[in-house]
Structure formats: structure tokens, C-alpha cells
Image: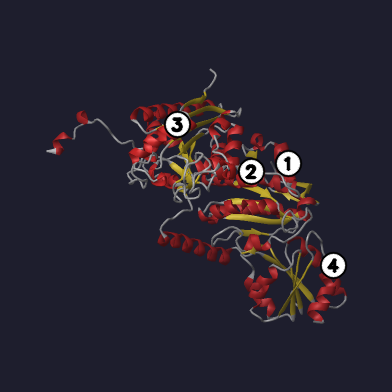
């Protein structure tokens, strides 16, 4: 019966070949899977699978190289923008992206992030911000909100002693080296589509050699936040978005 | 560029050798006493000569990770620094070794620990030879004693790095980096256009995507990686030992020294010979792999070995291991940027080995 239905004219969705067939290790409800798919579909639609080199971070997406069906390098914690710089400088014609979490990009890798952006490296930085260290078990991140609980801020983040959440995306948008900086989310179909459009623009801009493109995706962490996936998305809308408002932060002056 | 004879400063000669060796990329950060490497490259602008890319990074950490990225693309990538900067690079070096990427790292050693001093030293022997970064790994370590060797080891270093897919370190020091000597520059080697099958060059249709990583979450798999690395190091030990001996045929005593210390020790050896003391010298040119067999053989011939090092006694441990207790081994060193004189060395031989 089902065999009769598998015909080209009945095809409504086909998984992009820029994603491998490996089963994702991410927790149920996690935004990484959708973010991966949006980026992979962009690479597919632009026809640049063979010209793209990705850099995976340390964090939950450390194994991103299992899922993106492009040549990939696994960087040390925080060093992805430096690794991407090395790749782009020897292969200026290739499309190079990093995929990094908040701890990787905005804590241990702050120097590499700021300087790659300040040099205007022609790379795409995809920045997943869920305000927590997911892989190591829910510790405080540089983007953890004031008062937000984590395993290393069990009474809530006290900004007086633990510092403030770092709005690194706004900071990076100030640098002359960045060309396109935007903040998106992937928690609803509409938002995912918007995020995909932003990723596509950013990848296309790479051809222009005008500077670094940064797409932040504010995401959830139901395991780290100790919520159900639905609760996590609601909490994200109510707490993360007011602090990290969605939308373009720096757009090219055409 | 043709073969050429020039009078050059060590650091500048090394930089010129990098261009001539067909390097694709240099990433560095200034630090005394090796800043002339990046200064020379920036002035020379090799992108116009060969297409070689040169970039001043924001830190040593960034520089070694840029090397990692470029090396993963199958390119000849290198960096240089001096002791405190090399400590910062150690994280990246461990990753390069783990991911089995070829690259060249130059350490123009200065006195430590900490910020130490800017004067020459050999106190990074342990760091270079025993690991330095985390995990069970080795680098091939080449120890030049002349500006000429600094130049030749750039080419040799890249060749070995690609032959074994491993980081190679040139362990130089502030004397060799800063002094001027006559140097025979080799002919330009064309930059390679090869795309190794392990390199991230863009996924080709019909082949699996390439992943450069040092991560294996399953310990069974990580042990396999380690076994493969160890097999590679045994192969390197078998094939790549390099050393020179001086007047060892009739030697009753032996000096062991590398790099700058070996030059000074050679003078001490001549002075000793003039006094009728039959002493020879072994100078390891590779510190890993170490000339274990050669030293073991000489240990059976001499009454004692004095290692001379610009450190508090590091290579002496490897010399002792190599001798298997066949003969007495002592160490003489000056450190913290101090350089031993031939007289001091001769005196140490007489006190510690002959009279001791």
C-alpha cells in the first residue's frame, strides 16, 4: 500500500542531502536540530555543498560535524573563529562558517570572536544562544539572564558577584568588520523561516567579501532549564526575547 | 628564487626559508626574541612572491588555531614564538597532534619560568620533547645549532610533518635567532597543489565528507587513536634520528649537548683535547626522536658523560635513560638567560666527570 504512494508527484518534503542520515543526539525540543536544518537547506539551495567548510565548536553542537554533510573541522573550545580564519585565508573562495554556542563564542572564545569580526573575516558565524552550558550539565553561561538559575548559580545569577549577561551580538555589531548582524529564533515555523532567510543572506554576502556575518539564534534548553520543551519555548519568549530582542541589528548600507 | 648565499640574522633566514619551502600560511604574534620572523615576512610580502599568506593574530592562542584551520585544509602552515607564547600554543598543539595535522612550530627559546627573560635559554626542552600540552602525544623536535640548520630544518620540518601527519617543532634559542651567519638558501620549492584525502577542501561528489577532529567519545575508539599515534611515534623513532658526533673515535669522556650549547661545548672539547683530555661530543639534531642507540653505544666506551645545557638539567634525563647505567652521567648548565663559557664547561668536565 505505502509503496504505491512513494511517487515523485507525491513528494511534499525531502530531507536535504547537506544533512547526513545520522540520528541527532540533541535532547527532545532542542533548537539545534532546526537550526542545523535551516543552515543545511541554505547550503543546499545555494548549491555550495562542495565549496563549504564548517567549523564545529565545543558544547552541545560539538558533534555538528556528524550531521552537516560538508567538510568540517572540530575546533578547540572557543577557537572556532580563529580556525575559520585559517581556513578562509588559505581558501578565500570557499564558504566558511562556524557554529558556536554562547559559552564557546561569548566566554572562552571572546577574544577570537571579537578579533575575527574586527578583521572582517569573510565568514559566517552562527551563534546559538540559550543562556546556559548544555553539554556540561546546565552551568551558568555568559548570556545567563540576571536571576536565572543554573547549576553554578543555584540561587539565581547575582549580577553583583557573577557579572552581567553579555550582549555580545550588539557589541560585535559595533565593529567596522561586521557586515550583517541579526538575531533570530527557530522555535516556530514562522521564526524558523525568517532565520533561514537571514542565514541565506549571510551566506550570499560571503561572496561579496564585505566582512563578517553573524546570525544569532536565541534558543532553548529544556534539559538545562529543567522544563518541558513547550514550557521552555514559552519561557524563552517571556524572558529571553525581552533581553535579547529578535531582529536585524546591523544591515548592509546598500 | 634561486639558490643563494647570504649573510643573515637567524630569525630572518628562517622566515626566508619558510617562503622558499613553499609554505602556504604563517600566523604569528610578536614576542622577543623572535619578532623578526613576522617582521621579515610582512616586509617581504610573500603573497606576491609565492601566494603565501601572512597574518598577525590577536594572540598566540589564535595563531596556533589559525594554523590548525589551514593545516586541516592540507596546507603547509606554520607559526613561531618564544617560550611564554609557546606555552599558550600548547592547547592547539595537542589538538593538532590529536587530529594528526602536519604543521611547523618554531620556538626561539628564552629564559623562564614565567615571563622570565628575553635572553637565550634551552629550558623548554621538557615542554617540547615530553609533550607540553595534554594527552599522550609527541612532536618531532629539531634542534638547530646554526643559522644554516634553522633554514634547512624549515624544509625538513615541513617534509617530516607531512610524511607523518604530525606537528614538528624547531627548538631554537635566542642566540641562533639573533645572530648573523653565512647561510646557503635553498632554491624556491613550489607551493603544493595537492589535495590530501584527509583535508577539508570541500566535499567532492562520491566521497564522504571529511571531518578533522581529535574527539572520540567512545574510549574504545580513543584508545585506537592513541595506538595509531604510538605506532607512528615508534616509526619516527626508527627512521628519523639525526645527530652528529665529534672526535668520539678515541674518546674516554663524552659531552652531550644540543643547539647553541653544543657550539660552545665544541670549543670546550678543543680546549680539553689541547690539554690531552680525550673527550668527544654528541650533538642530537633531533630531540624527539632521541639518539638513544648512539648514546648507549658511546656509554659503553667512555668513563663518563657530561651534558651541557642552558637549563637546570633536562636532556640529562634522556641521556641517563639512554645509557642504561653503563656510565656516569652528570649535568652542567647555566640558565635564566645566562650562557656558559667554554672554560666553565671544561672545568665542569674536570670536576664532575674526571675528578668526580
Q: Is residue A57 left or right of residue B279?
A: left
Which numbered disc flags the more N-terminal residue, 2 or 4? 2
Pointer 3 residue: A241
Q: Report whether residue A122 is seen.
A: yes
Would you call the spot at circle 1 few (<14 residues within 10 Å), some (14-19), or many (20 or more)?
some
Q: Which mark is residue B53?
A: none
Q: Report whether residue B210 is seen.
A: no
Pointer 4 residue: B342
Please report the residue visible at 72 percent of the width from the left and 59 percent of the height from the top: B113
The image position of residue B143, as x and y in percent, is: 69, 59
Question: Disc 1 versus disc 4: distance between alpha carbons?
Answer: 33 Å
Pointer 2 residue: B26
Please report the residue visible at 40 percent of the width from the left and 62 percent of the height from the top: B220
The image position of residue A214, as x and y in percent, is: 51, 32
Pointer 1 residue: B40
Residue at the top extreme of this rendering: A254
Amino acid at each position: 500500500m505505502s509503496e504505491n504512494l512513494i511517487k515523485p508527484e507525491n513528494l511534499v518534503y525531502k530531507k536535504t542531502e547537506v544533512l547526513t542520515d545520522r540520528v541527532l543526539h540533541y535532547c527532545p525540543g532542542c533548537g539545534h536540530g532546526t537550526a542545523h536544518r535551516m543552515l543545511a537547506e541554505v547550503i543546499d539551495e545555494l548549491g555550495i555543498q562542495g565549496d563549504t567548510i564548517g567549523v564545529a565548536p565545543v558544547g552541545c553542537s560539538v558533534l555538528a560535524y556528524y550531521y552537516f554533510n560538508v567538510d568540517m573541522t572540530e575546533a578547540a573550545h572557543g577557537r572556532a573563529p580563529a580556525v575559520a580564519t585559517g581556513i578562509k585565508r588559505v581558501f578565500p573562495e570557499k564558504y566558511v562558517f562556524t557554529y558556536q554556542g554562547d559559552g564557546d563564542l561569548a566566554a572562552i572564545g571572546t577574544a577570537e570572536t571579537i578579533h575575527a569580526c574586527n578583521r572582517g573575516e569573510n565568514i559566517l558565524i552562527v551563534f546559538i544562544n540559550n543562556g546556559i552550558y548544555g553539554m556540561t550539565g546546565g552551568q551558568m553561561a555568559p548570556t545567563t539572564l540576571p536571576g536565572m538559575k543554573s547549576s553554578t548559580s543555584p540561587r539565581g545569577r547575582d549580577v553583583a558577584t557573577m557579572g552581567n549577561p553579555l550582549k555580545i551580538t550588539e557589541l560585535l555589531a559595533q565593529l567596522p568588520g561586521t557586515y550583517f548582524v541579526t538575531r533570530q529564533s527557530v522555535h516556530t515555523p514562522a521564526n524558523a523561516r525568517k532565520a533561514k532567510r537571514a542565514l541565506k543572506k549571510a551566506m550570499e554576502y560571503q561572496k561579496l567579501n564585505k566582512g563578517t556575518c553573524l546570525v544569532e539564534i536565541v534558543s532553548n534548553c529544556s534539559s538545562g532549564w529543567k522544563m518541558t520543551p513547550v514550557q521552555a519555548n514559552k519561557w524563552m519568549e517571556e524572558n529571553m526575547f525581552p533581553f535579547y530582542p529578535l531582529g536585524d541589528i546591523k544591515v548592509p548600507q546598500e | 628564487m634561486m639558490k643563494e648565499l647570504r649573510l643573515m640574522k637567524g630569525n630572518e633566514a628562517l622566515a626566508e626559508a619558510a617562503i622558499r619551502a613553499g609554505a602556504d600560511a604563517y600566523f604569528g604574534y610578536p614576542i622577543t626574541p623572535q619578532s623578526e620572523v613576522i617582521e621579515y615576512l610582512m616586509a617581504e610580502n610573500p603573497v606576491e612572491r609565492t601566494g603565501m599568506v601572512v597574518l598577525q593574530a590577536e594572540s598566540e592562542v589564535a595563531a596556533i588555531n589559525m594554523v590548525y584551520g589551514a593545516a586541516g585544509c592540507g596546507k603547509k602552515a606554520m607559526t613561531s614564538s618564544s617560550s611564554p607564547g609557546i606555552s599558550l600554543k600548547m592547547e592547539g598543539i595537542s589538538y593538532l597532534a590529536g587530529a594528526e595535522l602536519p604543521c611547523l612550530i618554531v620556538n626561539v627559546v628564552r629564559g623562564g619560568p614565567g615571563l622570565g627573560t628575553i635572553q637565550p635559554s634551552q629550558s623548554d626542552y621538557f615542554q617540547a620533547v615530553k609533550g607540553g600540552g595534554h594527552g599522550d602525544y609527541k612532536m618531532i623536535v629539531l634542534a638547530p645549532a646554526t643559522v644554516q640548520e634553522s633554514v634547512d630544518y624549515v624544509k625538513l620540518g615541513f617534509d617530516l610533518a607531512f610524511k607523518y601527519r604530525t606537528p614538528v617543532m624547531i627548538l631554537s634559542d635566542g642566540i641562533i635567532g639573533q645572530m648573523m651567519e653565512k647561510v646557503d638558501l635553498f632554491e624556491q620549492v613550489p607551493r603544493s597543489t595537492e589535495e590530501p584525502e584527509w583535508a577539508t577542501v570541500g566535499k567532492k561528489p562520491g566521497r564522504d565528507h571529511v571531518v578533522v577532529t581529535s574527539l572520540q567519545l567512545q574510549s574504545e575508539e580513543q584508545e585506537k587513536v592513541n595506538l595509531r599515534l604510538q605506532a607512528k611515534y615508534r616509526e619516527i623513532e626508527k627512521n628519523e634520528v639525526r645527530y652528529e658526533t665529534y672526535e668520539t673515535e678515541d674518546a674516554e669522556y663524552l659531552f652531550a649537548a644540543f643547539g647553541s650549547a653544543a657550539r660552545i661545548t665544541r670549543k670546550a672539547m678543543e680546549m680539553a683535547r689541547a690539554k690531552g683530555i680525550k673527550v668527544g661530543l654528541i650533538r642530537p639534531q633531533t630531540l624527539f626522536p632521541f639518539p638513544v642507540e648512539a648514546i648507549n653505544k658511546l656509554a659503553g666506551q667512555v668513563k663518563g658523560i657530561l651534558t651541557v645545557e642552558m637549563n637546570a638539567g633536562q636532556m640529562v634525563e634522556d641521556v641517563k635513560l639512554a645509557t642504561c647505567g653503563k656510565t656516569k652521567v652528570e649535568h652542567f648548565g647555566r640558565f635564566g638567560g645566562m650562557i656558559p663559557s667554554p672554560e666553565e664547561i671544561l672545568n665542569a668536565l674536570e670536576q664532575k666527570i674526571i675528578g668526580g
